[in-house]
Image (cartoon, rainbow, N blue to C red):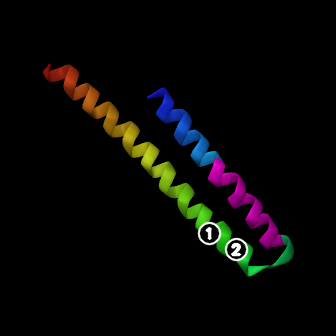
Amino acid sequence: MTVFYWLMGLLIVGTFCPSALYMGIYVFTGEDEALQRARKLWGFLRLFTLLAFNVTLWGHVVVAAWQLFH
């Protein structure tokens, strides 16, 4: 799970930073293309965050069930 945590952490940070950067570019310049990129990256950020949460949660459920019934 440690590799999974690191991988998801890198994906989450790797999509958050560019999203924040493009949002800042949009705020200061008003370019619509920057807003569209920020929205796309924000969508991927939500996807990766929910994936990490679900895999972590259900991974713990499966391990607990395995230990309980084994």
Q: Which mark is residue 35?
A: 2
Residue 59, how many percent across, how many down? 33, 34
In the picture of the structure, the residue carrying the numbered disc 1 is: 39
Dot 1: within a 10 Å radius of its alpha carbon, few (fewer than 14), some, or many (20 or more) residues? some
**Magenta-colored segment: predominant secondary structure:** helix
Q: CA distance from mark 2 to mark 1?
A: 6 Å
Dot 2: within a 10 Å radius of its alpha carbon, few (fewer than 14), some, or many (20 or more) residues? some
Q: Residue at x 54, y 38 (%)?
A: 7
* Location of residue 6 with respect to 17 vertically, above or below: above
- Magenta part of the protein: which range? 14-27
- Tag 1: residue type? Arg
Most foreground residue, 70 or 4: 4
Q: Quadrant of residue 45?
A: bottom right
Q: Quadrant of residue 69?
A: top left
Confirm whether the magenta stretch covers residue 35.
Answer: no
Residue 4, how many percent across, how many down? 47, 35
Q: Which mark is residue 31?
A: none
- Marks 1 and 2: in contact by CB < 8 Å? yes
- Tag 2: residue type? Leu
In the rendered image, the residue lying farthest to the right is: 28
Q: Residue at x 20, y 28 (%)?
A: 65
* Dot 1: element: helix
The number of discs equals 2
Residue 48, how many percent across, how many down? 50, 51
Q: Residue at x 65, y 53 (%)?
A: 16
Q: Quadrant of residue 31?
A: bottom right
